[in-house]
Image (cartoon, helix red, strand yellow):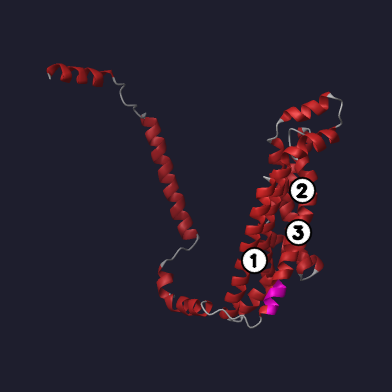
Amino acid sequence: MLAADTAHRSALAALPAPPVTPLATKLTRLVLAAAAVVVLVFCWYEAEMNPAQLVADAGNMATLGSEFLRPDFTDWDVYFNSMVETLAIAVWGTLLAVIVGIPFGILCADNVVPRWVAFPVRRVMDACRAINELVFALIFIAAVGLGPFAGVLALFVHTTGVVAKLFSEAVEAIDPAPVEGIRGTGGSWLQEVIYGVLPQVLPLWISYALYRFESNVRSATVLGIVGGGGIGMVFNETMRGFLYSQAAAILIIVIVTVSLLDVISQNIRKRFI
């Protein structure tokens, strides 16, 4: 028994001492935690967070909820046609963005073009991506007037910046061996892109394009609120008229449409990826 205790103590003594956190590291962590708390408190007041309003306005919320629980599909044909228009906006906004985004995505890739070409092109795409679709919609509404065409242009410009970034990241992650092989046989830059780059990135590009289409369907719904056409305009009119039952019907149509698109795009992805 004594021998066992001695062996156990010897084993414990042989274990390395637990790591000791330096005082500077502890102070740094404490300062960072305090800074995070300060930022959260500042944002709380800047955002005018007031949970008490949820209790004070509970009656209004209950009335609103009861109306939304009784969707009114009396004008379903109007909602359906508006949803079709929304899909058309998303289709053309995404298609134009993909067509333009392919060359811009290649020109943004450092491993395909010189850096002096990629850098300015990336900055242009950053500008397209940084401005929200709603802002673009307001700009194009002032230029071409109310309607779905302004929505298409807004989605087109913003989505071009998004898909160009996604496409360029896919290009930068390719295996360089096929490209080097084509270059070694005397192939041109265009042949390197067509036969060495595109076969590797095409499945990812298809996946990104489908994802952006789903996202643009939702965005097109919002664009209608500012006059960009589609079902968003009808939804805005119902909400402004306190027709919450009709608004609930519109939301159900949007949810069903987006869910169906998600199922379809998921099946398409399985075939290509």
The residue positioned 76% from the left and 62% from the top of the image is 152
Q: Main secondary structure of the magenta part?
A: helix
Q: Residues within 10 Å of mark 1 (few under 14, many from 20)?
A: some
The answer to whether residue 221 of the structure is visible from this angle is yes
Tell me where residue 5 appears, x and y as whole percent: 16, 20
- What's the CA distance linking mark 1 and mark 3? 18 Å
Please report contact status of discs 2 and 1: CB closer than 8 Å, yes or no. Answer: no
The residue positioned 37% from the left and 34% from the top of the image is 26
Q: Secondary structure at mark 1?
A: helix
- What's the CA distance linking mark 2 and mark 3? 12 Å
Q: Which residue is mark 1?
A: 257
Q: Secondary structure at mark 3?
A: helix
Disc with the residue nearer the chain's start (2 vs 3): 3
**Amino acid residing under circle 3:** Gly
Q: Which residue is mark 2?
A: 101
Tell me where residue 204 appears, x and y as whole percent: 69, 44
Relative side of 30 to 204, left or right: left
Relative side of 268 to 51, left or right: right
Q: Nearer the viewer, residue 236 or 28?
A: 236
- What's the CA distance linking mark 2 and mark 1? 26 Å
Farthest-out residue, bottom: 74
Above or below, comparing residue 167 to residue 235 in the picture:
above
Range of residues picked out in magenta? 77-82
Above or below, comparing residue 82 to residue 175 in the picture:
below
